[in-house]
Image: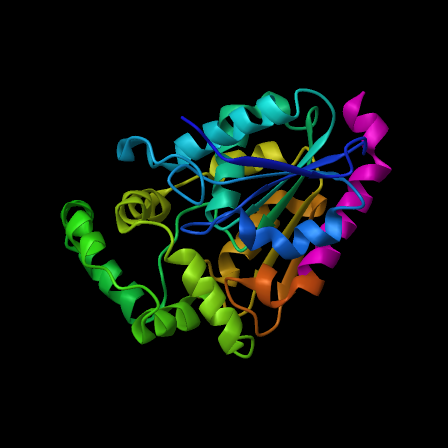
Amino acid sequence: MDLHVEVDGTPDAPLTVLLTHGFTARLGEWDGQRAALRGRSRLVLWDHRGHGRSARGDLRTATIDRTGRDLGEVLAATTPSGPVVLAGHSMGGMSVLALARQRPELFGTRVVGVFLLATSADGVVPGGVVGRLFGLVRRLGLLAVYLWWLQLIAPLLERFRRRGTALGRWYTRHYLFGRDDADPALVRRVQDMLEETPLTVTTAFYATILDDDETAALEVLRRVPVTVVVGTHDRLTPAAHSRRIAEVLGSGAELVVVPGAGHSVNLTRPEVVDGALMALLDRVEERLPRATG
């Protein structure tokens, strides 16, 4: 499986930051953080399978479990030694948690810090009307049928799909942005990015992000400094999810709740996200000799 990976930043920096993007996006969503971190650390960014410039592969592998393993492979291939901070947005954060479950021995040794942005440890269910409909489908025992139907019709929908529509902009504005952070140009930029991902890939991953449960991995993350960031108006991974993560992690975690922001908080509030990420690197570097032995 060919995964698109980019290495940037300061090559001889003592610390590497590995950034993992969210569902239906690509590594370009980290452009703001990339610019902020370039002079401070070595950077690794990559596209999830089926996203951006990575190969699509077998759609049966479109699972959080597999993206966690992909993350481990990217880490091994790009950074075979030295301390690493893992940063993940949305599905990227779930991938970090999956890696912690799969490879706990990495955390506290190779992985010395974690940055979780607008994510969840126990699945994602949208709010509003869509969330209520989903809850009804689940209570009626029809979730498997619904997901099967979505994947069945996805090739047809992709064939006749129109990108850049007003309906697509409404969806992007409603679910990816918050109360007061929806600049029209930025909404269009996010819409264009998300619509690059084929619907066949979107529907394949949709099933796994709904029911993914990585809560067991949180105990592993207690070994390292963690920062959790979320917007108050995030409709995809509501702030309650991040609060639960921070509560389980305890004193080793810092929770940053961004007023008015939505799911794309790294794009709409880059100064807040950059500052939180820099502060995490400060915390990590203070204990780096002890963490890396």
Q: Is residue 81 magenta?
A: no
Residues 126 and 18: in front is: 18
Quarter placement of the N terminus? top left
Residue 243 appears left or right of 123: right
Q: Going by the image, does 98 lie left or right of 42?
A: left
Measuring from the top left, give residue 176's x and y in whole percent.
Answer: 45, 65
In which quarter of the view is residue 11 placed? top right
Residue 100 lies left or right of residue 251; in this view the side is: left
* Main secondary-structure element of the magenta-colored stretch: helix
Q: Is residue 263 above or below residue 26?
A: below
Query: Image quadrant for the C terminus?
Result: top right
Display colour scheme: rainbow
Q: Residue at x 38, y 72 (%)?
A: 169
Q: At 82% across and 45% down in the image, what residue appears?
A: 282
Residue nearer the viewer, 121 or 162: 162
Residue at left 58%, top 35%? 219
> Is residue 258 something one can see in this rendering?
yes
How many labels, in total?
0
Is the residue 269 above or below the residue 183 in the image? above
Query: Which region is colored magenta?
Result: 273-293
Residue 85 x %, y %: 68, 37
Q: Is residue 236 visible?
A: no
**Where 237 falls versus 21 (above or below)?**
below
At x 50% / y 62%, what residue is drawn? 263
Rendering coords of residue 147 (x, y %): 20, 48
Q: Is residue 13 above or below residue 231?
A: above
The percent position of residue 87, horizontal first and vertical second, equals 61, 43
In this picture, residue 110 sits left or right of residue 220:
right
